Image (cartoon, coloured by chain):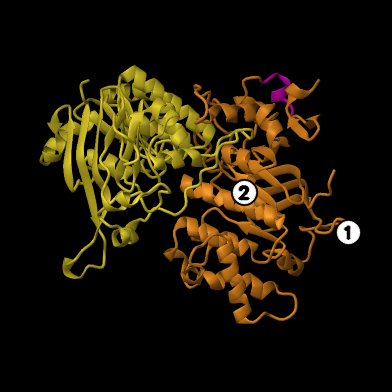
Chain colours: A orange, B yellow
Amino acid sequence: METALLEVKNLAVHFQTAGEPGGAGIAGGVSAGVIKAVDGVSFQLLPGETFGLVGESGCGKSVTALSLLKLLPTPPAILAGGEVIYRPEKKRPGKDLWQLPHGDLLKLRGKEISLIFQEPMTSLNPVMKIGRQIGEALRIHSAEKTPAAKEIRREVLAMLTRVGIHHPERAYDAYPHELSGGMRQRAMIAMALICRPKLVIADEPTTALDVTIQAQILELLKELQASYHLSLLLITHNLGIIAETAHRVAVMYMGRIVELASVKELFHNPLHPYTLGLFSSIPRLDKEEALAAIPGMVPDPLRLPAGCYFAPRCPKAMEVCHREYPMSREVAPGHTVACWLQEK
Amino acid sequence: MAKLLEVKDLKKYFPVRSAPLGFGRKWVKAVDRVSFTIAPGETLGLVGESGCGKTTVGRSILRLIEPTGGKVFFKGTDITSLAGKKVRLFRPKMQIVFQDPYSSLNPRMVVLDLVGEGLHGVSLQKKKDLVVGVLERVGLSPEILYHYPHEFSGGQRQRIAIARAILLQPELLICDEAVSALDVSIQAQIINLLIKLRQEMKMAYLFISHDLAVVKHISHRVAVMYLGQIMEVAPTKRLFANPLHPYTKFLLAAVPVPDPECKRERLVLSGEAQMGADFARTRVDEGCCFAPRCPYAEDRCRREEPPLVTAGKGHQVKCFLVKSK
């Protein structure tokens, strides 16, 4: 197997919540406790690969992404355990991003590993012109002395053109509110790529956009990924986007990966009942089928069931499922499932 | 076929700011001469991207916003010309479910009052009975009568919003992005609930959504909107199997298909819809509003506006490229 660019081992991120004790409502109101938002997540990201992380809201996919670069405020977040091994050079041993001194981590952020967020309106600085925002990374991360302003401007304009902005000069001097949603997301991508990173983490990059604009942005991401040989960690709730963009995918439920496989394998041979449930609950354009919804709803993260977290909603739950959480098991090369049904 | 609802040339223009003393004021044509009908028990899907005016259509029908022009007939009565209190007499028959169940339910009211708000002159016991009945219908337990909205999950809140809308047994339910804020597994539950209720209560739906797959799943007919106008209307199967308007084709091609093997011809529409002030400034009142983005646009498309032509049974398209039958 190829050496992974990023290796995440047993990642655990918890949140300390302060609620009113005993204030539990029907759907689990406010009560205090520790929420295990990410609970033992492991995966590898290969060079030049798109790895999808899919799940419903609250499953921990965004927390996973943000915690990799230690971007979560602590407290309330608690980086409870795990390793994030980043190996930019194949021959050399990697470094654990969580153990790096803060200064070294700052040098990596935005330079070798960058982020694309969901809502470009809230993640771009509203009082700073687009060009200056994109050039900021260049000013901060240049190796020796800061490049000349002209140089930076030239490079930013080239990158704006590269991401498909037709009037880069105009966009350079625009404030974020003057651009449309699609253009803002393009600017965001330009910002993420300006330092030629090795790894880009995209957290729901197209969720806030209309479908025709989403198609444009996905095409752009795919094309840029191929030409820059990027590794892309793509976080989304949309299985359609995964099918069209990712190479491998992990399905998350309640802070844990329940199934991990290549996209082809997962879509053709989904094994975990939750994955199956997800597939049968999406309305599709290419098929005529009644929707089979997953019954019930996600459990209260403060009152997780004793066994498998999906057992209360699972149509195939057995006695053991309610007692013990299943181990992850490799059922085919590269295809792991955490489900008692797979135990032989 | 009897018509439950008929919308004729509905218009809603919003003024754009920055017009000194109102001279030379520009207008955004949020809804521009929209016409359609809904038969009793029928579901019409209204799809389009953000800003295309689909929500404004829904709200204008209920007169939650006053339309600028056009007529809306509900069972033959023109509701747009009704004055004051008379509008209210129609509201029980036409209800709406909004997108965001977090902001559409009053946080200070308990479920009993939220759902039963539309009841007047009934005893408390009668109110309770009716509310419990409707809660059971939408799959909620009667124990929740005295709970507040914040105690519920998004899916449960949307069930409460639906219960509230169907309590008075409306004949038309407008669902304005009613499932868009929900996770897929919950979304499927609510879609199935809406389909069940439609059969049980013989309601007609105007189902407004940006999600083509959801609209396909629930609608009998679908209307596609772009910049305030209806570009294409057809029975659902027909529209998805044989879209005729270039915009519809691009819209369908843009939806990611959850099948890695599915290799489709990649159609990516360039450009963006011009909206808001930009739209008022750049919009020329002549020609097809899709022409600036349309790869097939001819000179004629930029000069004159295409009429809505019939291209088959129940299939109408607003495009010069489509020959009328």
Q: Quadrant of the N terminus of chain B?
A: top left
Pointer 1 chain: A
Range shown magenta = A317-325
The residue where tag 1 is placed is A92
Q: CA distance from mark 1 to mark 2?
A: 29 Å
Residue at the (75%, 79%) spot, across then down: A144
Place of residue B283 in the rendered image (x, y in percent of width and height, measured from the top left): 30, 57
Crowd class of label 1 (few under 14; some 14 to 19; many from 20; radius 10 Å): few
In the picture provided, is B168 more to the left or to the right than A54? left
The residue where tag 2 is placed is A62
Query: Closest to the observer: B145 or B195?
Result: B195
Report the number of numbered marks.
Answer: 2
Residue at the (26%, 22%) spot, across then down: B40
Query: Nearer the observer, disc 1 or disc 2?
Result: 1
Pointer 2 chain: A
Q: Amino acid at mark 2?
A: Ser
Mark toward the start of the polypeptide (1 vs 2): 2
Residue at the (71%, 42%) spot, across then down: A39
